[in-house]
Amino acid sequence: QGQGQVRCMSMSKMKEELREKGPVLLVWWTFCWLAPIAPLYFLAEYFQIDPAQMLEDATGFHVTEHVNKDWATLGGVVAFNEAMEVFRAPLVFASLPAVVRIARRWAPRLVR
């Protein structure tokens, strides 16, 4: 019974934290997800990385005949960005308290 009470208290604390910081977390996570896409795309273009050609070389299928290079690059960048989630998640959660403090000053409606 004592263990159940601890779980209920921590669950209620977690719900309160989510109610308080949820909107800031959503905005911060979205920003951290979107921010690297353009720089990664321009780096891929600068270094002439062609995901469609790489896929064609790896599989032997004629991918480049059917796929636009720019869209393939964008798709590769988005896939790579999603793979970076393993590194992004801890950074987002570690920086959340500082972001909440900033949000309280700049956008008090967003945070209670």
Image (cartoon, rainbow, N blue to C red):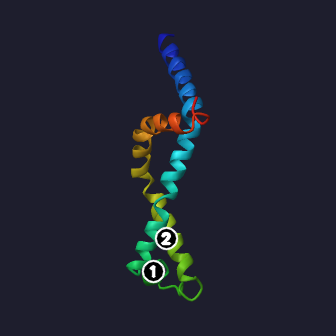
Residue 62 location, x and y as percent?
53, 87
Please name the amino acid that badge 1 sits on.
Answer: Asp
At 44% from the left and 44% from the top, the residue drawn is 92
Extreme residue in the front direction: 106
Q: Quadrant for the C terminus, please.
A: top right
Extreme residue in the top direction: 1
From the viewer's perspective, tell me whether residue 26 is left or right of residue 84. right
Asked if marks 2 and 1 touch (Cβ < 8 Å), the reply is no
Q: Earlier in the sequence, mark 2 or mark 1?
A: 1
Q: Residues within 10 Å of mark 1 (few under 14, many from 20)?
A: some
Q: Is residue 16 above or below residue 47?
A: above
Residue 104, labelled with which disc? Answer: none
Q: CA distance from mark 2 to mark 1?
A: 9 Å
Q: Is residue 51 above or below residue 106?
A: below
Please name the amino acid that badge 2 sits on.
Answer: Gly
Task: Report the residue marked by disc 1.
Answer: 50
Give the structural element (helix, strand or loop) at label 1. loop
Residue 58 location, x and y as percent?
43, 80
Task: Report the residue marked by disc 2.
Answer: 76
From the viewer's perspective, tell me whether residue 70 is left or right of residue 92. right
> In front here: 45 or 101?
101
Q: Is residue 64 above or below residue 86?
A: below
Residue 96 location, x and y as percent?
45, 38
> In front here: 30 or 56?
30
At 41% from the left and 81% from the top, the residue drawn is 48
